[in-house]
């Protein structure tokens, strides 16, 4: 699995799996935002969901490239790019 020359640290880090969790509030916000955008234009909710899905991929591939926003529980933050702010109702 590992080529000759990889250190023990490289092997340990390659085996680490990080869990991405969403709070219930985040899930509710996402659902409400999808509904909002879908009411604005059919299909827009799918475009909205592409942005967080892309961010999740970035986080999974390189979690340490994002700054820690809460040092007490080691929470890292990745801002969305296409839909940076949720609508207010």
Image: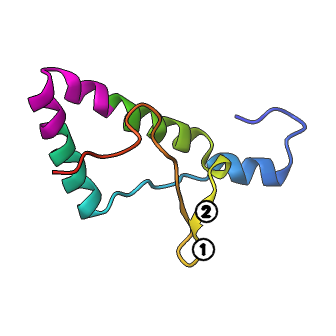
Say whether residue 64 is left or right of residue 19: right
Crowding at dot 1, Cα within 10 Å, few <14 / some 14-19 / many 20+, comes out as few
The image shows residue 2, relative to residue 79, as above or below, that is above
Say whether residue 42 is left or right of residue 55: left
Circles 1 and 2, Cβ within 8 Å, touching? The answer is yes
Image point 70% across, 51% down: which residue?
13
Q: Which residue is mark 1?
A: 71
In percent of width and height, residue 8 lies at 82, 53
Image point 54% across, 44% down: which residue?
59
Q: Quadrant of the N terminus?
A: top right
Q: Which residues are magenta?
A: 35-49
Image point 45% across, 40% down: which residue?
80
Image point 36% across, 45% down: which residue?
85
The image shows residue 69, relative to residue 31, as above or below, that is below
* Front one among 11 and 63: 63
The secondary structure type at the circle numbered 2 is strand
Q: Which residue is mark 2?
A: 68
């Amino acid at each position: 699995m590992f080529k000759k020359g990889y250190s023990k640290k490289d092997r340990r880090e390659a085996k680490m799996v990080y869990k991405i969790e969403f709070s219930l509030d985040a899930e509710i916000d996402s659902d409400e935002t999808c509904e909002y955008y879908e009411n604005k234009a059919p299909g827009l909710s799918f475009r909205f969901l592409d942005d967080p899905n892309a961010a999740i991929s970035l986080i999974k591939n390189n979690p340490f490239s994002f700054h820690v926003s809460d040092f007490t529980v080691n929470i890292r933050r990745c801002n969305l790019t296409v839909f940076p702010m949720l609508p207010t109702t």
